[in-house]
Amino acid sequence: MLNLNWNYHSHTLYTDGSHTVEEIASYCDGHGIKEIAITEHVKRELSYDFDALLSDIKHANSKFKVNIITGLEAKILPDGTLDCTEEIKSKVDIVIGSVHSLNGMDQYGAYEKLARSDCMIIGHPQLCSDKIIASMVSTGKIVELSARYDQQDDMIMAFKEAGLLFSIGLDSHKLSELDDFDRVKEMIQNFGLQDRLWKFTKNS
């Protein structure tokens, strides 16, 4: 039986999440989640103290059993860069790049730019093309499986056939979403992705 106990996409009260880092960590310990990434929304001009967030994560890591990974989620900009400073990127373990607003780009163009960017994980992808996939492969991208967004069967199969790895990222904003794995489990089983799952810590 497939046992998922990690989630590499979550948000806190620092942006649009509903809970503190400590509340998330406590929930994870009580529900068998071994590894969680706090991937807060960022922009080049932040409206909150990112170092305070990192301090909260460090404190929670010392207090709870769950392994909390530092991360961020940034949108792709028309110039092909992420809406994030190099300084902030250097402080985290996981960088998720997403298409959140087009800013004059068409969707395919936005994903083409995202595939060539310096993010690690493509957040909740919703479309692809041969060109986009080729860029993902050449830049070593990991693609996110997400129950929050509509991810078409043919897109998932195309990612698999290209040899891409998949990250479990539930884009959790509430505690109940941290381990809502049902849809993702269904996708993994339907498409035979068990051996294509990426894990930050191999033994989590």
Image: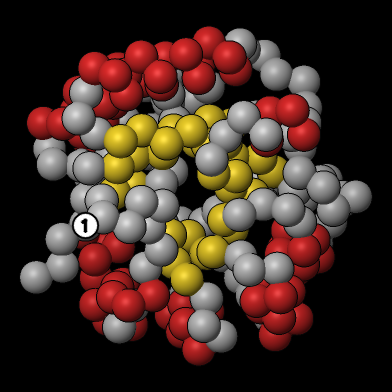
Scheme of image coloration: secondary structure
Return the residue at label 1. 4
Secondary structure under tag 1 reads loop
Q: Which one is nearer the viewer's eye here, 57 or 102?
A: 57
**Residue 129 in sight here:** yes
Q: For mark 1, does the 10 Å Cα neighbourhood hold few (<14), some (14 to 19), or many (20 or more) residues?
A: some
Q: Three-letter amino acid code at disc 1?
A: Leu
**Residue 147 in sight here:** no
Give x and y (percent) for residue 22: 30, 17
Name of the residue lying farthest toward the right: 79
Report the residue at 70% width, 68% height from top: 139
Above or below, 80 against 188 in this view is above
Q: Quadrant of the image for the N terminus?
A: bottom left
Q: Is residue 17 left or right of 189 when viewed as pictured?
A: right
Q: Which one is nearer the viewer's eye here, 120 or 180?
A: 120
Report the residue at 61% width, 65% height from top: 141
Give x and y (percent) for residue 142: 54, 64
How many dots with numbers? 1
Report the residue at 38% width, 57% height from top: 199
Q: Is residue 35 left or right of 110 when viewed as pictured?
A: left
Give x and y (percent) for residue 195: 32, 77
Name of the residue lying farthest toward the bottom: 161
Q: Is residue 119 left or right of 125 when viewed as pictured?
A: right
Above or below, 101 against 41 in this view is below
Give x and y (percent) for residue 147: 36, 56
Above or below, 27 against 54 in this view is below
